[in-house]
Amino acid sequence: MTYLPRAAAATAAEWPDLAVELDRWEEAGRSARLWWRDDDAVAPTSQLDRLLSLAGDMPLALAVIPADASPALAVALNPSPQIAVLHHGWCHANRATSGKKSEYPAERHPVDVADELDEGRQRLRSLFGRRALPVFVPPWNRIADRFLPLLTEIGLTTLSQQAPRKTPLPDGLAALDVHLDVTAWQGDRGFVGTGVALGRLIAELRQRRASGDDSAIGILTHHLVMDRATEDFIAQLFLWTRGLPGARWFGAGDLLAPP
């Protein structure tokens, strides 16, 4: 199997190319750390049922919207102890008066933001107990820097956004980011395509291998818009990576920095 150059790998990667890259991790005595985040859960749905079936016994971090989270969702997750719950904003509403969508734009009052964060944290802990991790996922992956210290004040120790990160985090707040969003948001909201998804993943793996960076690489899905092609890709990704020493899947809780 030829090793694709960077330009070709960006759009035309195939599954054996991923295996080649992970073999190189193994040859270097390293194992890439992978994790999976899915956003926008609030209640049991047919889409959630398909997501849980797809996950099987794989670790999954479910970003749950606190304001709309139902007790029935907690019941639906009971048979799946490997599924963690992350704090996904408050009600996933756009509060920005201009520009890109954000529930936490800089123009909001910090007291209002602090109250929402605290209420959301308490609600998730009440519904999901220890399954609710201290990880904050801002809707649309955006939160103004001025509000980041508020996260640690209510016990949220980790921020999960879309990499690459533009600014450093304040002391006391760790990062657990995602790197590959497989949804084509600028298109039909379906799957971005196997060649594109694998190309992005392989590029991230190459960069980590070259730099010696062992931080986790996150895969992002959205079950409410997940199509069959996305499901097939995730299933194949598990098949191609679970048996290779060059990759390991982790639950979000296993990747958190010690308190």
Image (cartoon, helix red, strand yellow):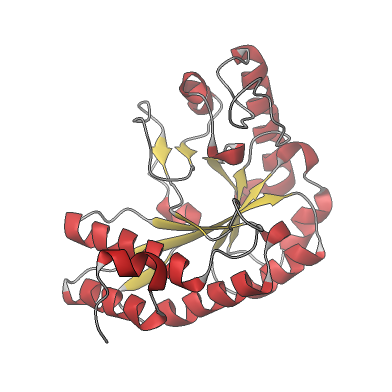
Which residue is drawn at the image coordinates 68% and 68% (left, top)?
227
Q: Is residue 199 left or right of residue 28?
A: right
Q: How many marks?
A: 0
| Residue 243 figure quarter | bottom left
In this rendering, the answer to whether 116 lies above or below 142 is above
Which residue is drawn at the image coordinates 65% and 26% (left, top)?
118
Residue 56 percent coordinates (x, y): 62, 75
Is residue 99 among what the camera can see?
yes
Residue 245 percent coordinates (x, y): 31, 78
Q: Quadrant of the N terminus?
A: bottom left
Q: As rendered, which of 95 and 83 lies closer to the eye?
A: 95
Q: As rendered, which of 258 and 246 lies closer to the eye?
A: 246
Residue 211 percent coordinates (x, y): 18, 54
Which residue is drawn at the image coordinates 75% and 54% (left, top)?
74
In this rendering, the answer to whether 186 lies above or below 18 is above
In this rendering, the answer to whether 31 lies above or below 166 is below
Q: Is residue 238 left or right of residue 205?
A: right
Outermost residue to the bottom: 1
| Residue 192 figure quarter | bottom right
Residue 138 percent coordinates (x, y): 58, 37
Q: Quadrant of the C terminus?
A: top left
Which residue is drawn at the image coordinates 29% and 74% (left, top)?
22
Q: Is residue 237 left or right of residue 117?
A: left
Is residue 56 among what the camera can see?
no
